Amino acid sequence: RLGVQRAAVWGMAARGDGLARLVSAPWRGEPYGIYARLREGAGVRRSATGLTVVASHALCSKLLRDRTFGVRTTDGAEPPPFTASGLPGDVEVIPSLLELDPPDHTRLRALARPAFSPAKIAGYRSGVENATARLLERALAEDRFDLVADFAAPLPIAVISDLLGIPDVDADVFARYGRVLGASLDGVKSVRHALQVRTANRELRALFTRLIAERRADPGEDVISALAASDELTEVELATTCELLLLAGFETTTNLIGNAVWSFATNPDQWDRLRGDDTLLGPAVEEVLRYEAPVQMTARISHRDTEISGVPVAENSMVIALIGSAGRDPAAFEQPDEFDIGRARDNDHLAFSSGAHYCVGAPLARLEGEVALRALTEALPRITVAAKPKWRSTSVIRGPRSLWLRP
Ligand code: HEM
């Protein structure tokens, strides 16, 4: 859906909508000056073409919890799902959790949630620690390494492979196609890329269909077995849910780690503070999520004519919540442009969204963030950046595309 909403906003920008252009600009560097302007006044803007953008913490939080809004239109006009390449011969793609409203959303979410219960999360810890140690050892053996390609990207893939019980022989296929589909969140840029996306969709669907059949016959302790045990999911729903777990947990967590290291590299006093105090690991992850949210925005569709702080919003029109702006709102956080890992524990950022679609994988993302930061504090007394980082060229997903470090 991230791709769909960006495509819709780009379309508006191309038709001359200044507000759409502002929120879809590939900032690469800093979107925060633009956010500050959008927060002025009531924190809500509406463009001539009917796009509404909310930028303040209070309005973003309210919108995400408001049942007047959903993620689908009431008239059945649906945008194409973001995993499709748009080419003939794509696998059947149905809306995932992210793209559903109740009652389907409620049913699917209830099935996905047990995989992220506190007991399950505690059980994943040693797997995350092992994958972290293995990747870091290899990276640190070099004179320079790319934190993103060598560590932040492979880690979530390794973790989710473990969770889903992807056999070693399939792990490379899984990682390769996960990367192709993850990159499609940046936009499908050429026919060649569209073909790669189509192949990735097909291969992943074939892999999951096979694994689901195998786990039905011979269940294990993994998430696919747990999902496959339910009678409430169709085959395609099952495969789609597995695909979402891969996609939703990959680019996001990669950018959490990339953003964390960049934030500490540019605030070395905070790195010293973290290295001296393990109890700051949890708050540090929260602070990164607030300061540099990996998912900068999401969208909702109004289910009836309504208003936001006096701005009229017609049924079936789109409202964008600028999550990254909410984290920098001075009405919600003191000195919001400062990176301070000592903030109070109730760091009320919206990086995992809020309300019905609150990130199911948040406990896993937090675990990965903490384990990664702990290992990095042990390995790197200081963060030495070897080359100016390149940033992703999207306005939805924020983080460095590459970040070269010297051990
Ligand atoms: C939903 C962010 C990691 C699985 C979401 C949403 C956000 C988000 C903002 C909701 C979007 C909306 O409200 O429209 C993040 C961030 C992560 C992260 C910043 C890492 C730092 C993960 C992981 C997994 C995961 C590791 C699973 C392995 C999901 C799922 C949903 C979701 C399944 C859909 C929930 C629903 O629609 O009910 N995430 N996520 N996420 N996330 Fe995450």
Image (spheres, rainbow, N blue to C red):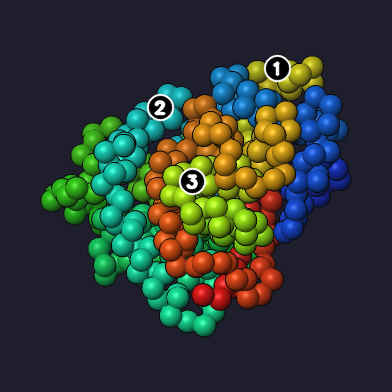
The residue carrying pointer 3 sits among few (fewer than 14), some (14 to 19) or many (20 or more) residues within 10 Å by Cα, namely some
**Left or right relative to 93: residue 221:** left
Disc 1: residue Cβ within 8 A of ligand 1's nearest atom: no
Q: Tell me: residue 72, above or below residue 214.
A: above
Give the mark, 2 or 1, whose residue is nearer the N terminus. 2
Q: Amino acid at mark 1?
A: Asp
Q: Secondary structure at mark 1?
A: loop
Question: What residue is pinned by disc 1?
Answer: 305
Q: Are marks 2 and 1 in contact (CB under 8 Å)?
A: no
Whether residue 26 sits left or right of residue 225 in the image: it is right
Q: Quadrant of residue 312?
A: top right
Report, in whole angstroms, how far the alpha carbon at label 2 lies from the one at label 3: 35 Å
Does dot 2 land on a helix, a strand or a loop? helix
Asked whether the residues under the numbered discs 1 and 3 touch, taking CB atoms below 8 Å apart as contact, a structural biologist would say: no
**Residue type (three-letter) at the residue carrying disc 3:** Leu
Q: Residues within 10 Å of mark 1 (few under 14, many from 20)?
A: few
Which comes sooner in the sequence, label 2 or label 3? 2
Q: Residue at x 59, y 53 (%)?
A: 270
Position of the N terminus, as image quadrant, is top right
Mark 2 residue type: Thr
Which of these two is toward me, 125 or 215? 125
Q: Which residue is mark 2?
A: 106
Closest to the observer: 354 or 385? 385
Estimate the x, y position of residue 104 in percent, counting from the top left: 41, 29
Relative image position of residue 152 (x, y in whole percent) = 49, 62
Query: Is residue 197 left or right of 127 when viewed as pictured?
Result: right
Question: Looking at the image, can residue 308 be seen?
Answer: yes
- The total of numbered circles placed on residues is 3
Q: Position of residue 311 (x, y in %)?
A: 79, 21
Label 3, on which residue? 280
